[in-house]
Amino acid sequence: MEACGSVYEVGAFSAEISAGATQTGRDPKGVKRIVRLNSCIAPDGLAAREAVRPSVARYLGAGRVRSKTLKAQGLDLPTEALQAVAGVPYAAGVVPYRPLLPLVTDRHVDALTLAGTIEEVINHVVGLFGAGIDGIIIRPFAPEGGTIEETIVTFGSEVWPRVMTALG
């Protein structure tokens, strides 16, 4: 599940996966729920969120995210803003979607990515596991002045061990 950073979205997708598995005679518990999230970890949580915010504008503007719960969470962008970027090819990158940035709040970022301080990211990941995911794949981003490698190392050496401890 790409860009599934919300516990509400995890719940909605898990229910759909379970229903589909049951309909096909599979054990729903045998279907792994893996999320893939653009991720950034920094001492300054705002800097981490700023690093992934353009990717959120791109997700929302291009309509690639097939969210079940964004509207219910009040996270839809205005139709007129989306019309301004309609037809822009996803392959064009984030630049054409920059006009949407003022509309992309931290709530949007939190619902579609994994970004913040070490503590914020740990709490976010623990919440996602509590909502029903079985695993996570991060696509690392660098905060301003940082590196992608630092995000990877921080996730692997500081976040993941503490998540595993929290989950028992």
Image (cartoon, rainbow, N blue to C red):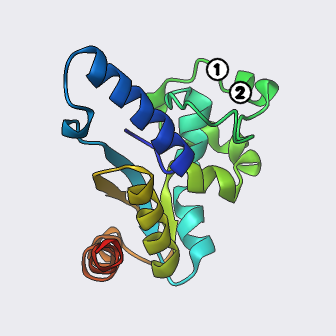
Specify few, some or many for label 2: CA neighbours under 10 Å numbering under 14, 14-19, or 20 or more: some
Tell me if label 2 and label 1 are in contact, CB under 8 Å. yes
Type of residue at label 2? Leu
Give x and y (percent) for residue 165.
Answer: 29, 79
Q: Nearest the camera: 162 or 116?
A: 162
88 relative to 106 in the view: left or right: left
Give x and y (percent) for residue 158.
Answer: 32, 82
Element type at mark 1? loop
Can the viewer see residue 55? Answer: yes
90 relative to 86 in the view: left or right: left
Element type at mark 2? helix
Query: Residue at left 24%, top 39%?
Result: 29
Relative to residue 29, is residue 141 depicted above or below?
A: below
Relative to residue 30, is residue 85 depicted above or below?
A: above
Quarter of the image where the C terminus is located: bottom left
Badge number at residue 86: 1
Q: Which residue is mark 2?
A: 82
Query: Residue at left 23%, top 41%?
Result: 32
Query: Residue at left 63%, top 72%?
Result: 46
